[in-house]
């Protein structure tokens, strides 16, 4: 299972492998690069990817780590999740990593969407 094993200001470690770019983390699938480079450029298609990569696994909740501080995407951007009855919890990068690990260990159908901004 994919577990967040470390994080810092501009990186996250999954199973001790370091990533310094935005990624999607599913418990039982390979880590997926997420083509999001800044919060201000988020588009609905970015969240469409979550549903597409989930495949037949029904996602219950997306944990969205938005960086050093919590920021909320406009509902029109995350509408695909609402239409699929998938919850979204938005939190800071660090809180998102911790929350994902807890939910994943409880065998919840969770995805972690980590935004690492490239300025």
Image (cartoon, helix red, strand yellow):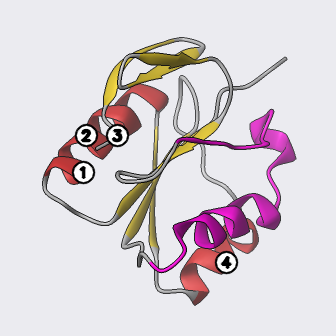
Circles 2 and 1, Cβ within 8 Å, touching? The answer is yes
Helix, strand or loop status at disc 4: helix
Q: Quadrant of residue 6?
A: top left
Q: Earlier in the sequence, mark 4 or mark 3?
A: 3
The image position of residue 61, as x and y in percent, is 39, 66
Closer to us: mark 1 or mark 3?
A: 3
Residue for point 46% across, 33% down: 92
Q: CA distance from mark 1 to mark 3?
A: 8 Å
Q: Is residue 40 magenta?
A: yes
Instruction: Bin the neighbour count of mark 3 within 10 Å (Cα to Cα): few under 14, some 14-19, many 20 and up.
Output: some
User: Residue at point 28% right, 33% down?
Assistant: 98
Using the image as rendered, state which of residue 30 and residue 18 is in the foreground. Answer: 30
Question: Along the polypeptide, which appears first: circle 4 or circle 1?
Answer: 4
Characterize the local packing of mark 4: few (<14), some (14-19) or many (20 or more) Cα atoms within 10 angstroms: some
Residue pointed to by mark 3:
2
The residue at which mark 1 appears reads as 104
- For the residues labelled 2 and 3, say whether their Cβ atoms are less than 8 Å apart: no
Cα separation, mark 4 vs mark 1, equals 24 Å
> Mark 2 to mark 3: distance in Å?
9 Å
Residue 9's place in the image compared with 26, above or below, is above
**Category of crowding for the residue at label 2, using alpha-carbon neighbours closer than 10 angstroms: few (below 14), some (14–19), many (at least 20):** some
**Vertical relation: 118 (above or below) 54:** above
Q: Are marks 1 and 3 in contact (CB under 8 Å)?
A: yes
Q: Earlier in the sequence, mark 1 or mark 3?
A: 3
| Label drawn at residue 79 | 4
Looking at the rendering, the stretch of residues picked out in magenta corresponds to: 31-56
The 10 Å Cα crowd at callout 1, few under 14, some 14 to 19, many 20 or more, is some
């Amino acid at each position: 299972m994919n577990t967040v094993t470390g994080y810092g200001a501009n990186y996250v470690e999954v199973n001790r492998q370091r990533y310094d770019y935005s990624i999607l983390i599913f418990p039982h699938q390979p880590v997926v690069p997420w083509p999001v480079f800044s919060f201000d450029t988020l588009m609905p298609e970015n969240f469409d990817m979550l549903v597409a990569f989930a495949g037949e696994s029904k996602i219950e909740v997306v944990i969205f780590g938005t960086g050093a501080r919590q920021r909320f995407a406009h509902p029109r951007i995350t509408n695909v999740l609402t239409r699929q009855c998938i919850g979204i919890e938005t939190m800071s990068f660090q809180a998102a990593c911790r929350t994902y690990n807890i939910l994943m260990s409880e065998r919840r159908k969770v995805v972690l969407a980590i935004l690492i901004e490239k300025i």
